């Protein structure tokens, strides 16, 4: 009779930050569940106090060690989050950036009809915040 060898989940000990869970259909939530099943330690953010009651029950069953607000458009929030990660974990192995934003009036029409300030907002939330997160260690 052969016995199956127990394997340690592949992400055991890895530190993963998941940004962008809004509901149970969020891509970020699917990633968080998968990383959890694979043994990762999770840091999960929610946009603001209005979003917190929607996200908190979803992450309650996950190995969430850090649960914090993050609105990348608010000065200092991203830096505060990364200072906490540095203090509690020392490093980060995985980043899931699944956030975007746009003005309602800019998503009703064609892309070329988007306002300049609407395009700047969308770029800041979706692109610039990703660059800032990806380069956090250099600060």
Image (cartoon, rainbow, N blue to C red):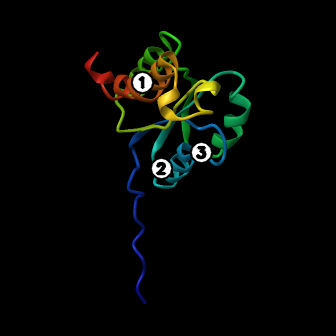
Which residue, given by chain and number where applicable, does mark 1 sit on?
129
Task: Tell which tag, 2 or 3, sits nearer the viewer.
Answer: 3
Give the CA distance from mark 1 to mark 2: 22 Å
Going from N to C along the chain, the mark reached first, 2 or 3, is: 3
Q: Is residue 18 above or below residue 137?
A: below
Q: Estimate the x, y position of residue 23 in percent, counting from the top left.
A: 66, 42
Q: Which label's residue is closer to the chain start, 3 or 1?
A: 3
Secondary element under disc 1, as helix, strand or loop, is: helix
- Tags 2 and 3 touching, CB below 8 Å: no
Q: Position of residue 48 (x, y in %)?
A: 65, 22
> Who's the residue at 34% across and 26% down the image?
131
Give above or below for 107 relative to 103: below
Q: Which residue is mark 3?
A: 26
> Cα distance, mark 3 to mark 1?
19 Å
Quarter of the image holding residue 64? top right
Bin the neighbour count of mark 2 within 10 Å (Cα to Cα): few under 14, some 14-19, many 20 and up.
Answer: many
Element marked by disc 3 = loop
- Residue visible at 57% across and 25% down? 68
CB within 8 Å, label 1 to label 2: no
Instruction: Provide residue 138's location: percent of width, then percent of height.
Output: 26, 20
């Amino acid at each position: 009779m052969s016995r199956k060898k127990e394997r340690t989940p592949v992400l055991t000990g890895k530190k993963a930050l998941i940004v962008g869970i809004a509901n149970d259909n969020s891509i970020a939530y699917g990633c968080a569940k998968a990383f959890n099943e694979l043994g990762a330690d999770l840091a999960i953010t929610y946009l603001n106090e209005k979003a917190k009651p929607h996200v908190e029950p979803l992450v309650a069953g996950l190995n969430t060690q850090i649960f914090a607000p993050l609105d990348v458009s608010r000065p200092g929030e991203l830096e505060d989050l990364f200072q906490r990660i540095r203090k509690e974990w020392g490093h980060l192995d995985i980043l899931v950036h699944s956030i975007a934003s746009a003005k309602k009036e800019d998503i009703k029409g064609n892309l070329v009809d988007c306002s300049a300030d609407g395009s700047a907002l969308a770029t800041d939330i979706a692109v610039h915040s990703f660059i800032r997160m990806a380069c956090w260690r250099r600060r």
